[in-house]
Amino acid sequence: MAMAHALADKAGAVILPHFRTGGAVDHKGGDAFDPVTAADRDAEAAIREALSAAYPSHGIVGEEFGDCRADSDYCWVIDPIDGTRAFIMGQPLWGTLIGLTAGGAPLLGLMDQPYTGERFWSGEREAYFRRDGRTSAMRTRPCLSLAEAALATTTPDMFAGADAERFERLSRAVRLRRFGGDCYNYCLLALGHIDLVVEAGLKPFDILPLIPIVERAGGVVTTWEGGDPRGGGRILAAGDKRLHEAAVKALSG
C-alpha cells in the first residue's frame, strides 16, 4: 500500500502541470474519439519505471503501454488518467487508478485526484478517504429500493442496442440519474453519496483498482448479470446488496 501511495504521488506530480493548459490531444484511432495526452503517457511511464525498480518480478497491465508479465503472481493494474475526456475539458472528474492483483484477485486499489487533493483507497478490511491531510473510513449508504436510488454513469453513449434499452429501463426506475464522472463515481459510491454505478465497455484497468475500494466500503461490484467484474465489460456497482439484486433483475429484464 505504501508503494501505491508513492506511485500516486509520483503520477500526480507528472500530471498536474498538464491540467488546464490546452496541451496537444492525440486520437488513438477507431470510429469513436479515444483521446490520449502527454500526461497519460508520461504518468504511466513514471509509474512503470518505479515499479520495475522496486518489484522487478511483478507484472504490469497499463492502458497506454500494454501488458508486461501479466501472468505473474503479483500484477499491478494502472490507468494513469481514467477520464481523459474530462481531463482535456478541464473538468476535475478524472483520477489515477492503481491496483494490485494476487493470483488474479484484486488485493488493493487506489484512486487519486491530485487537483482536488482527494485520495481513496482500500485497506485490509475497510476503505479510506483523505483530503486536507485528514483520513477517514468510508461506508456505502443503505438504499432498499430503486425508487430511492441515485444512479451515475459516465455517458449514455456507452450503451447501444439492447444494452441501451436495459440501461434506460433501470435508470428510469431510480430517483435520480446523472452523467459524467468516470472512476470518481465509484469512489463517491464508496463514500456514501451515490447508490448505483452502471457502465459498459470497460477494460480491466478501468475497474480492477476500484473493486476493493467499493467492496471494503460495504458495496458490491459485478457484471450486469451478477458475475465476475475483473474482466471489465458491463459493470454494475451498488452500495447496498439488496439494491444490487434489484438492479440485476432490472438489467436482465
Image: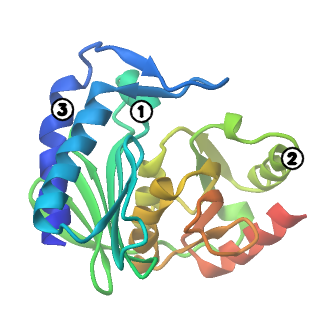
Dot 3 or dot 1: first in sequence order is 3
Q: Which mark is residue 84?
A: 1
Dot 3 or dot 2: first in sequence order is 3
Q: Position of residue 209 (x, y in %)?
A: 40, 63
Query: What is the CA distance from the residue labelled 2 to the residue labelled 1?
Result: 27 Å
**Type of the residue with mark 3:** Leu
**Type of the residue with mark 2:** Glu
Q: Which mark is residue 165?
A: 2
Q: Relative to residue 56, is residue 173 drawn left or right?
A: right
Q: Which mark is residue 16?
A: 3
Residue 116 shows in this picture? no
Q: Which mark is residue 127?
A: none
**Type of the residue with mark 1:** Thr
Question: In the picture shown, does residue 105 fall above or below 18?
Answer: below
* Outermost bottom residue: 125
- Eye-nearest disc, 3 or 2: 3
Q: At 69% across and 34% down in the image, what residue appears?
A: 157
Dot 2 falls on a residue whose secondary structure is helix
Q: Nearer the viewer, residue 140 or 248?
A: 248
Q: At 78% across and 56% down in the image, what residue appears?
A: 170
